Image (tube, grey):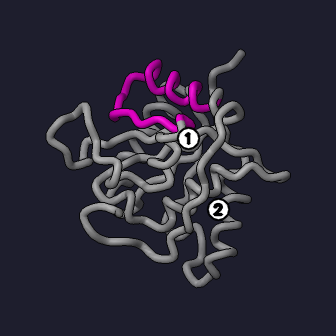
Amino acid sequence: MTRRHNVFISYHHKNDEGYKNEFERLFHNAYDIIETKAVSDGDINPNYSTDYTRQLIRDNYIKDATVTVVLIGSETWQRKHVDWEISSSLRDTQRNSRTGLIGIILPTYPRIDQTKYNGHTIPPRLFDNTQRGFATIHNWSSDPAVVQSWIHQAFLRRKTIATNNGRDMFVNNRSGAQWQ
């Protein structure tokens, strides 16, 4: 049995591109434990309708993924595209199976205690699924065995635990210190 998985990476493009690149460098290039895919700036025309953009994300970027990794920085929870990507990852359709889901807290995430996080400063849809046991949250690691284990466990959970995708999707990016 192979433990190598197709991983879709969701992240805040402006703030966390460097960590997305490092994640790919470590786990795709250096250790070859995952195959990665992500939407990059400029990949999708910003003039497309919201519905069409969501469909493109699901059908062109997430479709082959078995696990979605959300890189969580200081403003990731505010991004509408992150919300859309998580929502698309949770949907189990005839064309695309749902993916497993994990969050990885980046070193830029603001907190005093490195063993805790504020649930209202991670993407709300990700938080909902941690409460259900479908998703898990981890601190950033560069250890390939550890990261591969997180991803593989998410892969195993994707068909055995129900998801929570009931929130209304973001219409716009959000602001503020945390969501309510």
Q: Residues within 10 Å of mark 1 (few under 14, many from 20)?
A: many
Taking the image as shown, residue 154 lies to the left or right of residue 113, namely right
Q: Residues within 10 Å of mark 2 (few under 14, many from 20)?
A: many
Q: Amino acid at mark 1?
A: Leu
Q: Which residue is mark 1?
A: 101
Q: Amino acid at mark 2?
A: Ile
Taking the image as shown, residue 67 lies to the left or right of residue 178, namely right
Q: Is residue 147 magenta?
A: yes
Q: Position of residue 151 (x, y in %)?
A: 54, 30
Callout 2–callout 1 Cβ contact below 8 Å: no
Label 2 vs 1, first from the N-terminus = 2
Q: CA distance from mark 2 to mark 1?
A: 16 Å
**Farthest-out residue, bottom:** 47
**Farthest-out residue, right:** 94
Image quadrant of residue 140?
A: top left
Quadrant of the image for the N terminus? top right
Residue at left offset 39%, top offset 58%? 77
Q: Is residue 144 magenta?
A: yes
Q: Which residue is mark 2?
A: 57
Q: Position of residue 157 (x, y in %)?
A: 63, 30
- 6 or 28, nearer to the observer: 6
Image quadrant of residue 179?
A: bottom left
| Residue extent of the magenta highlight | 133-155
Residue at left offset 51%, top offset 76%? 171
Q: Position of residue 118 (x, y in %)?
A: 28, 47
**Farthest-out residue, top:** 1
- Is residue 177 shown above or below 115? below
